[in-house]
Image (cartoon, rainbow, N blue to C red):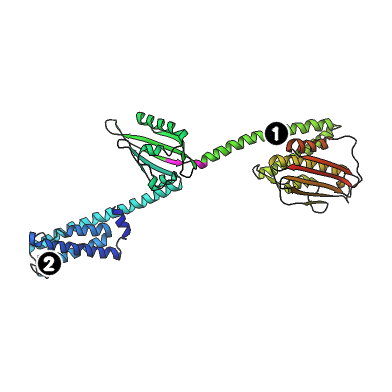
Amino acid sequence: MLTRYTKLVPANSALAMGMAVGCVAVATATRIALTPAIGHSVPFITMFPAVLLAAVIGGFWPGLLAVGLSIVAAWYFFLSGSLGFSPISAADATGILFFTVGALLMVLAATSMRRALDNLKEAQEKLLAALDASGTGTWRWDIQKDIVEWDPAMVNVFGQGFRNMPRNVGEFVAFIHPDDRERAQRVIEDSIKSGSTIEYEFRALLPDGEERWIYDRSRPVYDAERKPLYMIGACLDITARKKAEERQTLLINELNHRVKNTLATVQSLAFQTMRSSRSPEAFQDNFMARLMALSATHDLLTQSYWESTFLSDVLEAELRPHGGVDQKRITTQGEPVKLKPQQALSLGLAFHELATNAVKYGALSTSQGRILIAWRQADNTDLVIQWQEQGGPSVGKPERQGFGTRLIDRSIAHELGGSVDMNYAPSGVECRIRIPMA
């Protein structure tokens, strides 16, 4: 209550000085009203409270002003026997001296108390700000009276207003998720019996239905007879940490899954490349080229934390060994399209095989050859990619299907649920890829 007034009245301000004058005026009027009952004795009886109040609310200089005004008022109204500043006796002078010393001690004590209150208030504000910034709140439960007290930071942790603050342990438990209530109550009861400090986590339900994870650390306090008096504790909002842990677990599981898939893909590439290679040297060249194509797409996905990558970036990465997308020999057309990790990996291998065939037999085997790659999303669901070669040597349909063609079919049809249409036109190979984007 007192800090409210010390906060409203700045120390040693003009307002504080005015309040000191008002306090002395009220004290003087009160003492005059008491004159018929007690006479002119004890003239400073009402001045002490005025000085104390002026010093507590206003500070040192208002208190000192109250001391001086009190001496003047007492001399004028009571010590001279009549109104005025007549000479005073030795006894009155001694009374003024004792009042001055006592009042000054009161001013010093009150000033120290006010300073302590200001420091306490500042420390409390800093503590509450730190607790609020860290998502931590403190609480106290009077076990004997079953009264729960929360600080303002605790209110923010649970997303409650001051009016909804719990008044007893039953109302506090109501904020806990139903699946965690029994365990939380059991932990608290065991702590009261054993007297040990406890740490536990539980889920809290907010008024809007949001679910928060709370970490609580608390301990009971006993009297001399080992009777539990109250329990104090602190709650920390660990929702962000819990979500990070869940995301980390998900990423680890996803990483394990993708590593297994990648190893299976590499194993299949090695086996099929070995079957279709005529010599160890050819196997090494073909396998390393396909492995590097797979690695190029992996690098793109790593940059985006394996969430997605753009189709244009996959094309650029796979065609970079052949001059890249220069919009001259190799031209691309299409709106930005994001690919999921598996889509990017499968299409990357398919583009590598098409580019390799173009270098060996198609448009990239001559200086006049060109490749146009265009894509569009049909009905906002399927992605259609058109690979068209021009200006190269005349081509015809191969007598047998090579591993590269089988790899394209397997990557698109089996892994992405899409389709591949290869057309070996004399003017150049045309490949039409269609994959679902849903």
Q: Which mark sits nearer the N-terminus, 1 or 2?
A: 2
**Type of amino acid at the residue the image marks with label 2:** Phe
Write down the region rendered in magenta: 235-240
Quarter-of-image position of residue 360: top right
Q: Residue at x 29, y 64 (%)?
A: 15
* Residue found 19% across the figure and 57% down from its top: 49
Tell me, yes or no, whether the highlighted magenta stretch contains residue 239. yes
Residue 438 horizontal/vertical position (percent): 69, 42
- Residue closer to the observer: 383 or 264: 383
Instruction: Count residues near mark 1 (Cα–Cα under 10 Å), then give few for <14, some for 14-19, many for 20+.
Output: few
Residue 261 image label: 1
Q: Which mark is residue 77?
A: 2
Direction from residue 15 to residue 136 in the image, left or right: right
Quadrant position of residue 64: bottom left
**Three-letter amino acid code of the residue under disc 1:** Asn
Residue 141 vs 275, above or below: the answer is below
Judged from the image, the secondary structure of the residue bearing numbered disc 2 is helix
Instruction: Please tell me which residue is depicted at 70% across the width and 39% down the height of the picture.
Output: 342
Residue furthest to the front: 379
Q: Which mark is residue 7?
A: none
| Above or below 28: residue 393 | above
Left or right: 346 as drawn, with respect to 401: left
Q: CA distance from mark 1 to mark 2?
A: 102 Å
Name the spot of residue 251 as percent of width and height, x first: 61, 37
**What is the quadrant of residue 54 in the picture?**
bottom left
Q: Residues within 10 Å of mark 2 (few under 14, many from 20)?
A: some
